[in-house]
Image (cartoon, rainbow, N blue to C red):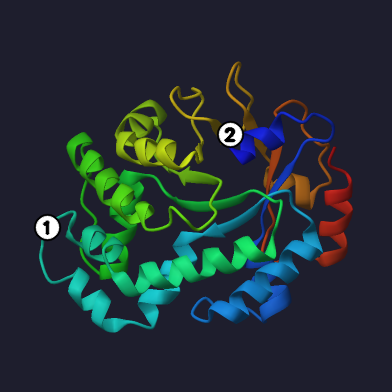
Amino acid sequence: MGAFRDLLSKGGRRPRWIDATDYCGRLLAAGDIPWGDVTRLVDWHRKAQGLLRPDVAALPLVPLTRAWIGGHESLREAMSARRRLLYPLKTLLSDEALRDHIRAILNGLRLSHVGVPLALVLPAPADFVGFAAELAGTEVEPVDADDADSAAMYMADFLRAFGDSGIDALLLETAGSDVTGTVTACAAVLNIAGHYRWDVGLRHEGVVAPAGIDFQVAAAPAAGLPTGLALGADFWRDGAPTPEGGEFIFASVPADAMPETVLQRLQALN
């Protein structure tokens, strides 16, 4: 059992995993999160944690990578150099400068958030293929099972670079409806996570709870699988009641939410 599942096993108030990147980017960084500056980014992250008091410190890879590509045109050009489906992702994840930058951020977050599970949030394999193609400016093509398996191997090699960075959990995110197939494609990622004793979860909008992972983020709890109940937009806008069930709460704070409302709604969680 990793540090995140250990947190879930303690009982009492349901832990809170808060996705507030856009909200805290507006509130604490005037909409310009310093993704490219390790010291400033860690300081911004520390302030965001202090403001919202989540029980998990999470680093989202998608906005970080998008910002990195925006400042490194040569990498974007390299990603689009060949018209093969997986080439943009392979090129992106093998970039040593990007790996070094992420490693430095994770090390800084680990030192700043002692005793709190540290999570890396990233797309599931098939979703990562599409995201990399988007960054490269190439056509986003359909991804089959073999492509997803290969993408997971590139991801596993990438994640191996952070084996000593203090990560406790990975949260994979998918927009696809085949959650079972998504987890099956993650075999290489699950293997490397098992080696480092990282808990692995899947955030999805499906109705079937996937087997083979440690937790999920979904709209409804599942028997035998720790679940983070994802709060809907009505929780923030209309004062909807706190959902019942689940082992933890997953709260995505709208970017345009009012600070007073956010604090009031967070206080309503149990």
- The residue nearer to you, when weighing 243 against 12, is 12
Left or right of residue 17, residue 78 in this image: left
Please state, as top left, top right, bottom left or bottom right, where the C terminus lies in the image: top right
Image position of 116 (left or right of 41): right
The residue at the point 64 percent across, 64 percent down is 111
Q: Can you identify the residue that label 2 sits on? A: 218
Type of amino acid under label 2: Ala
Report x, y in % for residue 65.
Answer: 41, 68
Residue 26, percent across and down? Answer: 68, 74
Looking at the rendered structure, the secondary structure element under dot 1 is loop
Considering the image in quadrants, where does the N terminus appear? top right
Residue 32 visible here: no
**Residue under numbered circle 1:** 84
3D distance between C-alphas at marks 1 and 2: 33 Å
Secondary element at tag 2:
strand
Q: Amino acid at mark 1?
A: Arg
Residue 62 position in % (x across, y down): 45, 61
- Reply above or below: 115 against 178: below
Counting residues from the N terminus, which is met first, the one under dot 1 or under dot 2?
Answer: 1
- Mark 1 surroundings within 10 Å by alpha-carbon count, few (fewer than 14), some (14 through 19), many (20 or more): few
Give the quadrant of residue 92: bottom left
**The disc label shown at residue 268, or none:** none
Q: Position of residue 104 (x, y in %)?
A: 49, 71
Q: Is residue 242 above or below residue 39?
A: above
Residue depicted at 30% across the width and 61% down the height: 93
Which residue occupies 69% across, 60% down?
113
Of the pair 93 and 84, the residue shown nearer to us: 93
Quarter of the image where one finds residue 22: bottom right
Cβ atoms under marks 1 and 2 closer than 8 Å: no
